[in-house]
Amino acid sequence: MKATAKLWMGIVVLIILSPLGLIIPAHFKAGSAWGEWSAGEIRKLVGYAPGGLERLSSLWKAPMPGYAFKGWESKGLGNLSFAYIISALAGTAAVVMVMVFIGKMLARKDKDG
């Protein structure tokens, strides 16, 4: 099997497993998934939030907050897991498109240079 095929198979497995970041914290009643805390959640967890995080937290608004479609936040774990998979697919597609574009630009640069 080619290395590229193995890479894509690994990526597909990771995409399918992506809802574990949602399911495991819910199962153990651990709150938010690890590392996905807002400035307010960090303040509640450790007693303060770094000033830079407070200042920059409103700079970026996610296209799919909580990795869910608008209005799906309360639809249950099954629907949220599906939204996580769709979010992983969209993110993977975006990264692949950017990498293909950069690769084409670099190949063109080598060809012209």
Image (tube, helix red, strand yellow):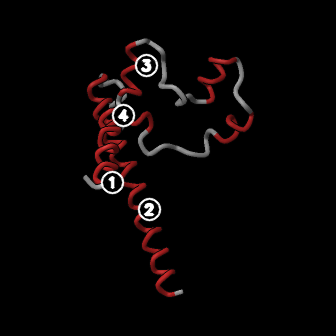
Residue drawn where x is 40% and y is 48% of the image: 91
Question: Dot 3 corresponds to which residue?
Answer: 25
- Of helix, strand and loop, which one carries label 1? helix
Q: Quadrant of residue 37?
A: top right
Question: Dot 1 corresponds to which residue?
Answer: 3
First along the sequence among labels 4 and 1: 1
Question: Dot 2 corresponds to which residue?
Answer: 99
Q: Quadrant of residue 98?
A: bottom left
Image x and y of residue 61, in percent: 52, 44
- Of helix, strand and loop, which one carries label 4? loop
Q: What type is the residue that disc 1 sits on?
A: Ala
CA distance separating discs 2 and 3: 32 Å
CA distance separating discs 1 and 3: 34 Å
Image x and y of residue 94, in percent: 40, 55
Residue sitting nearer the eye, 83 or 93: 93
First along the sequence among labels 4 and 2: 4
First along the sequence among labels 4 and 3: 4
* Image quadrant containing the C terminus: bottom right
Question: Dot 4 corresponds to which residue?
Answer: 18
